[in-house]
C-alpha cells in the first residue's frame, strides 16, 4: 500500500454535523469519488417531497430508483412496519417461518399469472436475479443435464451488479465493460423486435439452444440500460422460442413490477407467463429492502426429490425479513384499496402532454412514455453533474444517466408536482441548446 491519503472533497466541511463527520467515510454508488458532486443531505421525506438539511424541498422525479410507488412515508405502510417491529423485527427463515412471509408468498402467487406459485425471498434485486439463474441451471442439473449452463440475454440489458447479474447485462453499453472477459461468458443478442431480429434469434437458438439453461429479459422496458421500450409481441416471441427449444424464460420485473408500466406486472400486458420472475424495488413500496424470485410448478418440481443434492442450496441471512414482508403486505393492500393503476394511466397522459414540447428542442433524439415512465433521450449529455445542478435550481430531484433524462415519479404524485417536473425537464433540456 502506498499510504497515500484520500484528499478532502468539496462539501465535506458543509452541512449538519452528522454530514461533516461522516461524508469522508462513505463510498458512493456509481460515482467517481474524486470528481463527484457531494450528495445532498436529506433530513426528511414525505409524499413526493425530499426535504434537505438547509430547508429546501425538492419534488422527487424518480421515487428513489423507482421504489417509492406510493410516495414516501405512507401511513399505512409505516403503521404496518411499526406493528411488526413490536412483535418480531427479524427471525431466520431456516427451520422457522412467520405470518408476514407466508401471507406475502400466498398473495404474490395469487397475483401472478399461471402457476407461478413458489416464492423464494431474498434482500435485493441483484440477488433475486442470481437466485433465478441458479434455479434455472440446477433445473437442468437435477435432470442429469450438465450442458445447459449458459443464458441468453439482450443488447442494452441490465440485471444488477453482482457477478452473475453483471454477466447477463450488456457490457458493451452498460456499466461493466471493464469486467468483460472476467465474468462467466453468456450470450447477448438483439431483442426480436422485427422480422430480421426474430430470424436472428431463431438462427442463434438453432446453434446454441443445447447450451442454454434459459432466456432472461426485462419485459417491456430495459431500465438502467437506457429506458428502452419494446412491445408485447417481443415477449410472445420469446415465450414461443423458449417453448420450441425447451428453455426456461425468466422475466426480470424488478423495475417493471408493481404498476410501473400500466399493469401490475409487465407480463400481464403481453399475456405471457414466464417460468421464473424476479421482483424487488417497489415490492415494499420503497420502504425496506426485500426481493423475491417466483417459479412455476414445473420448475419447483425438479427440486422436489428424495435426493438432498437436488435442494436449492441458497439462503440469504435476512431473507423473508418480517419488517420487509410487513411493508410488502401493506403495499399490496394499497394496490387493492387505492386506484394505483388509474393513477399510472393519468400520469402517462400527463407525461405525454408535459414532455411533448421537448420533441422540438435541439439535441433531443426521442421522447417516449410508457405508464409512469417518461423519457427524453438526448443526442448526448456532456456534463451530468451540471445537468443535475440545473434541476436542483428548479426545485426538483432528477438524476439523468448516459444520454437519458427520465421521470419515474410516485403514483400518488399531485398534478401540480408532476407539472413542476415536466416543466423543469422542458426548461432545462431547452437551455442545453442555447
Image (spheres, rainbow, N blue to C red):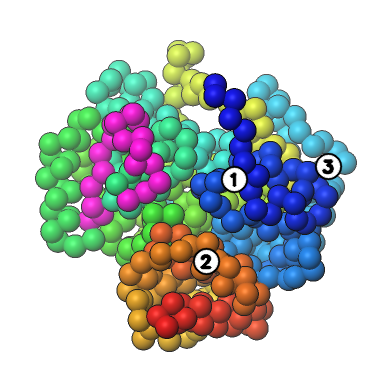
Q: Which residue is mark 3?
A: 85
User: Number of callouts in the render?
Assistant: 3
Where's residue 335, x and y in %?
Answer: 63, 63
Q: Where does residue 132 sit, x and y in percent of width and height? A: 44, 36
Q: Is residue 191 magenta?
A: yes
Q: Secondary structure at mark 1?
A: loop
Q: Residues within 10 Å of mark 3 (few under 14, many from 20)?
A: some
Mark number displayed over residue 386:
2
Q: Main secondary structure of the magenta part?
A: loop
Residues in magenta, as a range:
173-192
- Separation of disc 2 and disc 1 at Cα? 18 Å
Front of the two marks 2 and 1: 2
User: 301 or 394: nearer the eye?
Assistant: 394
Picture layout, residue 111 above or below residue 337: above
Image quarter in which the N terminus is found? top right
Image quarter hosting the C terminus:
bottom left
Amino acid at each position: 500500500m502506498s499510504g497515500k491519503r484520500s484528499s478532502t472533497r468539496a462539501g465535506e466541511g458543509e452541512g449538519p454535523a452528522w454530514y461533516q463527520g461522516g461524508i469522508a467515510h462513505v463510498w458512493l454508488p456509481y460515482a467517481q469519488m474524486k470528481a463527484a458532486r457531494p450528495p445532498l443531505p436529506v433530513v426528511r421525506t414525505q409524499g413526493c417531497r425530499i426535504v434537505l438539511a438547509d430547508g429546501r424541498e425538492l419534488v422527487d422525479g424518480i421515487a428513489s430508483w423507482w421504489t417509492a410507488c406510493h410516495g414516501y412515508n405512507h401511513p399505512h405502510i409505516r403503521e404496518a412496519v411499526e406493528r411488526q417491529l413490536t412483535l418480531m423485527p427479524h427471525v431466520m427463515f431456516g427451520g422457522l417461518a412467520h405470518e408476514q412471509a407466508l401471507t406475502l408468498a400466498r398473495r404474490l402467487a395469487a397475483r401472478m399469472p399461471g402457476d407461478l406459485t413458489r416464492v423464494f425471498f431474498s434482500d435485493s434485486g441483484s440477488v433475486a436475479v442470481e437466485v433465478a439463474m441458479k434455479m434455472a441451471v440446477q433445473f437442468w442439473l437435477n435432470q442429469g443435464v450438465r450442458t445447459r449452463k449458459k443464458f441468453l440475454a439482450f443488447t442494452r440489458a441490465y440485471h444488477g451488479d453482482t457477478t452473475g447479474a453483471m454477466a447477463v447485462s450488456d457490457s458493451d453499453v452498460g456499466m461493466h465493460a471493464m469486467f468483460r472477459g472476467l465474468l462467466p461468458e453468456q450470450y447477448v443478442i438483439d431483442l426480436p423486435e422485427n422480422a430480421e431480429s426474430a430470424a436472428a434469434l431463431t438462427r442463434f437458438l438453432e446453434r446454441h439452444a443445447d447450451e442454454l439453461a434459459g432466456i432472461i429479459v426485462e419485459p417491456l422496458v430495459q431500465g438502467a440500460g437506457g429506458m428502452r421500450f419494446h412491445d408485447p409481441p417481443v415477449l410472445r416471441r420469446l415465450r414461443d422460442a423458449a417453448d420450441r427449444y425447451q428453455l426456461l424464460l425468466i422475466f426480470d420485473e424488478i423495475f417493471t413490477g408493481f404498476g410501473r408500466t400500466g399493469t401490475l406486472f409487465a407480463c400481464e400486458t403481453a399475456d405471457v407467463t414466464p417460468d421464473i420472475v424476479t421482483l424487488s424495488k417497489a415490492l415494499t413500496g420503497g420502504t425496506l429492502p426485500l426481493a423475491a424470485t417466483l417459479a412455476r410448478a414445473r420448475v419447483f418440481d425438479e427440486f422436489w426429490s428424495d435426493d438432498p443434492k437436488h435442494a436449492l442450496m441458497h439462503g440469504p441471512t435476512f431473507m423473508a425479513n418480517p419488517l420487509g414482508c410487513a411493508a410488502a403486505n401493506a403495499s399490496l393492500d394499497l394496490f387493492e384499496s387505492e386506484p394505483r393503476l388509474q393513477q399510472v394511466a393519468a400520469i402517462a397522459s400527463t407525461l405525454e402532454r408535459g414532455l411533448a414540447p421537448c420533441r422540438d428542442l435541439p439535441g433531443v433524439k426521442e421522447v417516449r412514455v410508457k405508464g409512469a415512465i417518461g423519457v427524453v433521450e438526448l443526442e448526448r449529455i456532456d456534463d451530468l453533474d451540471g445537468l443535475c445542478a440545473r434541476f436542483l435550481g428548479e426545485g426538483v430531484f432528477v438524476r439523468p444517466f448516459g444520454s437519458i433524462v427520465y421521470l419515474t415519479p410516485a403514483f400518488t404524485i399531485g398534478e401540480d408536482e408532476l407539472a413542476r417536473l415536466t416543466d423543469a425537464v422542458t426548461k432545462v433540456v431547452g437551455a442545453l441548446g442555447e
